[in-house]
Amino acid sequence: MYTQKMLRDGALKGKTIVVTGGGSGLGKAMSKYFLELGANVAITSRNLEKLKNTAKELEQETNGICLPLQCDVRNYDEVEEMLKGALEKFGTVDVLLNNAAGNFISPTERLSANAFDTIIDIVLKGTKNCTLAFGKHWIDTKQSNTSILNIVTTYAWTGSAYVVPSATAKAGVLAMTRSLAVEWAKYGMRFNAIAPGPFPTKGAWDRLLPGDLKEKFDMAKKVPLNRVGEHQELANLAAYLVSDFSAYVNGEVITIDGGEWLKGAGQFNLLEEIPEEMWDQLEAMIRAKKTKS
């Protein structure tokens, strides 16, 4: 049942949506559903080759128009160029979905200042860059009925051990969402956020929990519903929040986690059980993966 599509056909017809981090994982799943509902979609990330492959695949599956745009959200100039590319192709942009993120698990004392900065720059600064560029454009062109949807996490408000840079950055994104929902509503903009629980994706979860760690720390066991999320469930919620059906929803963060955070706040607190030796192994595996890529 929870893999079924929620909105009626054509529910997003006429809308153009930009999805950062749209080349894979949850960004790709949400982009696909937006296209199925009739939207034009631009997907962005740093890896243009991957984006082109994804765009081609999504166009074949949905018969929609998917534009790949290379962009490192950490650089404001690149964000402005990305917006320009979307406008040149589609004329207008109606929705921004800030989905680009970075994360890794580590005891905080093992992190370098640069490692901490990398996550802050992608998640908080990247979201800020995209929000400012798109928001200023909409204000300058007097375009109303626009919206920005941010992907946060439940540990944006609970905090969580072992993912401190991510928790710090996501808390900032949530504060920005709520603040601008009030300040920029007068320009016809809505701001909302989604806080997903465990929705396993190959790339992100392999990086976070490499090797047999995924088996050792089965996320489903922490969820009262005793399962992880299906990508379509998240896509359904995202599509609703960027559609005109949610025109009166503003400044809201919606949790979709099967009750996980209520059961045990701090998604990665369970990593307390990892011994020092395993952290050494984990670090070595992550470094080896980085070297290969």
Image (cartoon, helix red, strand yellow):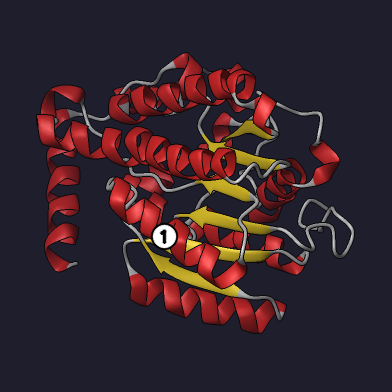
Identified at 36% across, 41% down, the residue is 126
Image spot of residue 118 (x, y percent): 22, 39
Residue 23 visible somewhere in the drawing: no
Image spot of residue 85 (x, y percent): 46, 66
Looking at the picture, tell me which residue is in the foreground, 179 or 105.
179
Looking at the picture, tell me which residue is in the foreground, 183 or 208.
183
Looking at the picture, tell me which residue is in the foreground, 207 or 195.
195
Identified at 14% across, 31% down, the residue is 111
State whether residue 269 is above or below residue 231. above
State whether residue 266 is above or below residue 284. above
Amino acid on which disc 1 is placed: Met
Image spot of residue 231 (x, y percent): 63, 54
Q: Residues within 10 Å of mark 1 (few under 14, many from 20)?
A: many
State whether residue 218 is above or below residue 46. above
Residue on which disc 1 sits: 82
**SS at mark 1 in the image:** helix
Position of 157 compared to 77: left or right?
right
Looking at the picture, tell me which residue is in the foreground, 104 or 184.
184
Position of 203 compared to 242: left or right?
left
Residue 72 visible somewhere in the drawing: yes
Image spot of residue 35 (x, y percent): 69, 67
State whether residue 141 is above or below residue 153. below
